[in-house]
Image (cartoon, rainbow, N blue to C red):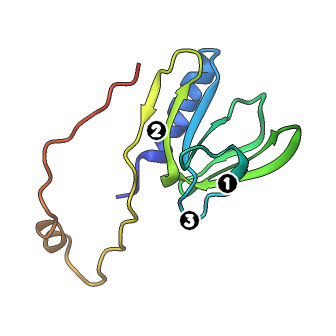
């Protein structure tokens, strides 16, 4: 099954914008494939304003998020794998969603039966949600 992260990012982005707030994303700037202005990275992370008035050409695909933004008055292209997005929230009140760091998942083995693949999955502890206020 594909990751729900890009769908959640798009949904929360729309919800934040619909409520006249400013959508921000928190990105792990140390992951491969992340292209952000390094001078604004702090503790390996960067917070980006992705409001319609701050960026041009915002694209939140299932694999990558990209846009053109201004940093210190200079237009720069920004892109990151969706898995590098650690959260999406409203600047004004902090409401939104945080995500766990995503580890790349290996492709399923070819020629295996789904029931055999499911039986090999390790059991995990109960799911948990984080409340962001």
First in sequence: mark 3 or mark 1? Answer: 3
> Residue 37 in the image: x percent, y percent?
73, 50
Residue 6: image tag: none
> Residue 94 in the image: x percent, y percent?
50, 21
Q: Which residue was labeled with disc 3? A: 32
Indicate whether 94 appears above or below 120. Answer: above
> In the rendered image, which quarter is residue 1 located in?
bottom left
Quadrant of the drawing holding the C terminus = top left
Residue neighbourhood size for the residue with mark 3, other residues' Cα within 10 Å, grouped as few (<14), some (14–19), many (≥20): few
Q: Which residue was labeled with disc 2? A: 8
Tell me which residue sits at (14%, 74%) in the image. 116
Could you tell me which secondary element the residue under label 2 belongs to?
A: helix
Could you tell me which secondary element the residue under label 1 belongs to?
A: strand
First in sequence: mark 2 or mark 1? Answer: 2
The residue lying toward the viewer, choosing from 72 and 34, is 72
> In the rendered image, which quarter is residue 106 located in?
bottom left
Task: From the viewer's perspective, tell me whether residue 97 is left or right of residue 108.
Answer: right
Task: From the viewer's perspective, tell me whether residue 53 is left or right of residue 61.
Answer: right
Residues marked 3 and 1 touching at CB (< 8 Å): no
Tell me which residue sits at (58%, 52%) in the image. 29
Residue neighbourhood size for the residue with mark 2, other residues' Cα within 10 Å, grouped as few (<14), some (14–19), many (≥20): some
> In the rendered image, which quarter is residue 108 located in?
bottom left
Indicate whether 93 appears above or below 53. Answer: above
Q: Which residue was labeled with disc 1? A: 79
Could you tell me which secondary element the residue under label 3 belongs to?
A: loop
Residues marked 3 and 2 touching at CB (< 8 Å): no
């Amino acid at each position: 099954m594909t990751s729900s992260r890009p769908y959640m990012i798009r949904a929360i982005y729309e919800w934040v914008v619909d409520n006249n707030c400013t959508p921000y994303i928190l990105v792990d700037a140390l992951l491969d494939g992340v292209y952000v202005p390094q001078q604004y990275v702090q503790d390996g992370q960067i917070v980006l304003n992705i409001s319609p008035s701050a960026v041009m050409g915002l694209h939140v695909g299932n694999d990558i998020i990209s846009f053109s933004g201004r940093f210190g008055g200079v237009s720069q292209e920004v892109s990151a794998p969706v898995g590098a997005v650690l959260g999406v929230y409203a600047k004004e009140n902090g409401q939104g969603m945080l995500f766990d760091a995503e580890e790349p998942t290996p492709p399923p083995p070819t020629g295996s039966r789904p029931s055999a693949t499911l039986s090999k999955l390790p059991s995990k502890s109960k799911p948990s949600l984080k409340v962001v206020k």
